[in-house]
Image (spheres, rainbow, N blue to C red):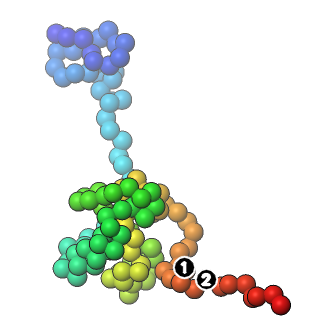
Amino acid sequence: MKYCQFNGCTNKVEKGAYCLDHVVTRRSKKRKDIYHHENKSFYVTDAWQDVRADVYERENGKCQRCHKFVFGRTAHCHHIIPIKKNPTLKLDVNNIMLVCPKCHAIVENEEKTKKVFASYFKINPPLSK
């Protein structure tokens, strides 16, 4: 027999690392998935892989939010206007931004509506005479 590995517990256990009092508290919580996976079949297509490569090259491998270098699985391509709202923009490189996983969670949970070409159509105030 050995002692329970829970910090400060003096109970003894025959099998496992934790006593019956602490085995429940050690279970992992279910993580809410923030990404929309109903489009999972789309993300394995050659067309998506090509667009993803173009976006990565356009951004020189840097997160557009925090400017950290990302590669491999840490390079997430985020749809500015979600596929749910406008499926016609799912392969538009101007609707996709490269982000790191930390920034992706932040950007995904933002509630503001985004415009794809907002920076191109800035309205300048009229010149005063």
The CA distance from mark 1 to mark 2 is 6 Å
Residue at the (45%, 76%) spot, across then down: 81
* Quadrant for the C terminus in the image: bottom right
Question: Is 118 located above or below residue 56 in the figure?
Answer: below
Locate residue 35, reporting x and y percent: 36, 63
Please give the residue where the numbered disc 2 appears in the rendered image. Answer: 122
Numbered badge on residue 14: none
Q: Residue furthest bottom?
A: 129
| Left or right side of 125 for 95 | left
Q: Secondary structure at mark 2?
A: loop
Decide if residue 127 is on the left or right side of residue 31.
Answer: right
Q: Residue furthest right?
A: 129
**Residue drawn where x is 46% and y is 61% of the image:** 65
Q: Using the image, tell me which numbered label, if any, was put on residue 119.
A: 1
Any part of residue 34 in sight: no
Residue ID at (55%, 80%) = 118
Q: Quadrant of residue 119?
A: bottom right
Judged left or right of residue 75, residue 78 is right
Would residue 72 be visible to someone looking at this image? yes
| Nearer to us in this view, 69 or 110 | 69
Q: Pick whichever, 47 or 53, lies toward us.
A: 53
Q: Secondary structure at mark 1?
A: loop
Residue 33 x/y as whole percent: 36, 56
Amino acid tagged 2 = Lys
Report the residue at 55% width, 66% height from top.
Answer: 111
Q: Does 77 sit above or below residue 90?
A: above
Q: Position of residue 3 (x, y in %)?
A: 24, 11
The crowding category of the residue bearing disc 2, from other C-alpha atoms within 10 Å (few below 14, some 14 to 19, many at least 20), is: few
Query: Toward the viewer: 8 or 72?
Result: 72
Query: Is residue 69 placed above or below 14 in the rendered structure?
Result: below
